[in-house]
Amino acid sequence: MADLSSRQPFGAWLLKQHDRPGFIGALAKGMRADRAFPRNGSVDDVRKHLSTIRAEGDAFEALDDAETDWLCH
């Protein structure tokens, strides 16, 4: 696992996943259109944002998958 202090913020990484197939890509596409999305935010910031906008459970599952992918690469 890479040092978290040296990588780009999770929010920025997630937005770059918009062309990716599956739930992570769908989440990224939806968040690109959201002006309030925490682009420089952490995973927790994104999770709070999803709660604030009352996102569906699938969005949180996609977020969990995205977090795992972000941490492993």
Image (cartoon, rainbow, N blue to C red):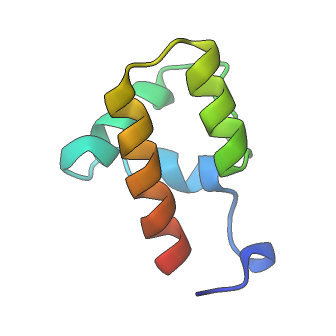
What residue do we see at 37% from left, 35% from top? 27
Number of numbered callouts drawn: 0
What residue do we see at 59% from left, 21% from top? 51
- Name the side, left or right, on which 36 lies relative to 17: right
- Name the side, left or right, on which 23 lies relative to 9: left
Residue sitting farthest toward the left: 21
What residue do we see at 71% from left, 50% from top? 42
Name the residue nearer the viewer: 2 or 35.
Answer: 2
In which quadrant is the N terminus drawn?
bottom right
Is any part of residue 18 visible from this angle? yes
- Name the side, left or right, on which 20 lies relative to 31: left
Image position, residue 16 (x, y; %): 46, 52
- Name the side, left or right, on which 68 lies relative to 61: right
Say if 53 sits above or below 15 in the image.
Answer: above
Say if 34 sits above or below 3 in the image.
Answer: above
Image position, residue 8 (x, y; %): 68, 65
Name the residue nearer the viewer: 17 or 70.
Answer: 70
Is any part of residue 29 visible from this angle? no
Residue sitting farthest toward the right: 5
Name the residue nearer the viewer: 19 or 41.
Answer: 41
Image-quadrant location for residue 30: top left
Image position, residue 26 (x, y; %): 29, 36
